[in-house]
Amino acid sequence: MKAPFKLSRRKEILLDFLLVFLFAAMLIRPYFKAKYTDKWASIESTFIADARFLVEHWPHPQWQPLWYAGTRFDYIYPPALRYGTAAISKVTGFWPVKAYHFYTAFLYALGIAGVYLLMRVGAGSRGAAYLGAVATSLMSPIFLFMPRFRGDAWKLQPQRLGVLVKYGEGPHMSALALIPVALAFTWLALEKRRPWAVALAALFSAGVAANNFYGATALAVFYPTLVWSFWITRQEKRIVAPAIAIPILAYGLTAFWLVPSYFKVTAENMKYVSEHGTTWSIWVAVVVAVAFAVTTDRFARAKPERTWDVFIAGCVVFFSLNVLGNYYFNFRVSGEPTRLLPELDMIYIMAIVLLLRWMWNRPGMVLRGAAVVIVVAAFWSAKGYIRHAWHMFPLWPDYQGRVEYRVTDWLWKNMPDARTYPTGSVRFWFDTWHDLAQVGGGSEQGLLNGQVEPAQWETNLGPNAEPTILWMQSMGADAIYVADKRSQEVFKDLEYPQKLAGVLPVLFDDQQGNMLYKVPRRYPARARVVETAKLNALKPPRFNDDVEYLRAYTDVIEKGPDSPATLVREGTDAMRVHARLDAGQSLVVQESYDPAWHAWSAGQPLSVHKDVMGMMAIDAPPGDREIEIAFVTPLENQVGRVVTALTILVILALVVLGIREEWRG
């Protein structure tokens, strides 16, 4: 049996934790201070842009007017990374790009130390914990049987580092970093009555969800597996209370942003970023779960020394089923399982260390010798990465020479109030340096207006100019960015980049394959006085190139009454519109509708509803009107803030209670 969790042991673990953290931090040292790298195709650009926007609109914009024709700021992404990056930028003066790299690098190193912490408290072996943590920082077992990912890893750099640096999955890797810490405190809370461990387990679990939903999905597999491992091996009713309290408190800490409508929007947006799950996969998952429960009941019931073994075995089974099952057999319950490859790596390393420890503890020299050979061979495979660890982050100091910067800088200087349709890597980096409105956005998450998607699909893939122009007019776009094969832009999203040539006037042409075309719009403001009856008679487009219905809509907003409106934004959450309306006329504001938008004129509330393009339609009485429009904090968020405040008090009370009990003990 392992030693009690006494003060001296805690000091030892804390010192080891810091040493492992420093080791991992040294491996990625250049990333802590990196600004722009050569990863211009990386999705990290959208997180950097999001943090830059937050820095300039601190502390909490409720509406994000730049993406998807407008959406709730909370919907776009969980808050931890965006606020962590913005806070670092504000406190240190770092550019948001450097603050983002510092934040993700710090948590990356913390995650390696977290592996040590989980293995130390779970396996009870200092040597095994060190071996597991160091191996996690240097290698990826999945490369043995997944050659596609092995070939994508320069010098066999660990999968989690490649995902962070090459693909920009900073939020996911930050969430992954907190998972073993959350599980370690959960272990301590289930092992013995420790109120402070319950509080910390809830805090770090909330941190996982507050960084990334794929990390939260992984935790949703790890956590019940750990609880079952304790229950089946110990059969103690005392386990139930902390097992229930931890997720409840974790949700309470996130309640101020993780409101019911957030779940709804996220579920709806899944169709844009992943395939649907399959019924047979759900049945297979149920069968495997039942088989695991029956097997562990047979071999581990009331055997507390097997708790760690059951936990590791369960994680291997469920993550292998999900990730490898998807890779080889298209198994899919929800989301994109291969996104969880770093989690699979981590659990495989823990399982291998468990096997090596068993081999080392067997009598005789054969198994011990085999264990030594396996360890030496594994670390020998990491020699290329170790030698080139600091070369994984090639810098790009001349970011102003990139097309992503040049196009957005031109727009900022010449059309700062325009809404543009950018494509490819220019879209990714569109708001990194300036507040520029675009039809699309970061990564199709938090998208409130569903019509934004067919507008993008038709513009990118359609061969004809007319439906593209009609979509852009419907979305209130003033310009379209097009990159042809000569362009430095990475993705070349438009299948037919020449379809607008000679059809629309050119605003910008750098003779390097980058062009901005002007979209014809009757008035520059994204507000229109329209005939109410005609607006109400419109129908949404039936398909992406439904010219008939698209033209019917644009005729209403571009060929309506000769009554230009003016629109002035008052921060992120309010607008003021001036318009003259006659009887039978309404106002359309080309901003995504949300029930939280309210409008008033002369102190009287006005009806705000959604038109067929998902924009705001406002019913105002006739006359020369000054209309105030404001995003009012939804009730669900107000309630969530109260729940979070109360949860924080409970967390503090548990910590104080735990400290008192420790001192009395």
Image (cartoon, grey):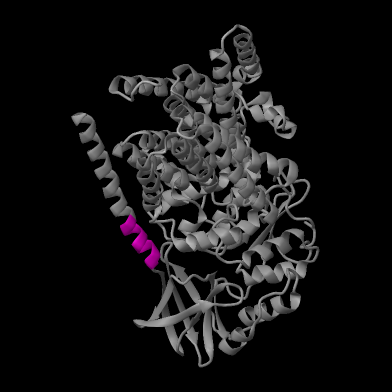
Instruction: Say if the magenta span includes residue 637.
Output: yes
Among the 4 quarters of the image, the one containing residue 568: bottom left
> So how many labels did they put on this image?
0
> Which residue: 40% across, 21% down?
2
38 vs 247, nearest the viewer? 247
275 vs 663, nearest the viewer? 663
**Residue 626 spot, x, y in % from top left:** 41, 80
Residue range (magenta): 634-643
| Residue 478 in view in this figure | no
In the image, residue 267 sits, relative to residue 112, either above or below, namely below
**Residue 17 spot, x, y in % from top left:** 41, 24
| Residue 251 in view in this figure | yes
For this view, does 656 lie left or right of residue 247?
left
In the image, residue 555 sits, relative to residue 243, either above or below, namely below
Q: Which residue lies furthest to the front in this view?
A: 298
Among the 4 quarters of the image, the one containing residue 197: top left
Q: In the rendered view of the protein, which quadrant contains the N terminus?
A: top left
Q: In the rendered view of the protein, which quadrant contains the C terminus?
A: top left
**Residue 268 spot, x, y in % from top left:** 59, 62
Principal secondary structure, stretch drawn in magenta: helix
> Which residue: 66% across, 15% down?
377
**Residue 459 spot, x, y in % from top left:** 72, 62
Instruction: Say if the magenta span includes residue 394.
Output: no
> Which residue: 56% across, 87% down?
532
Q: Residue furthest top?
A: 365
In the image, residue 14 sits, relative to residue 473, either above or below, namely above
28 vs 630, nearest the viewer? 28
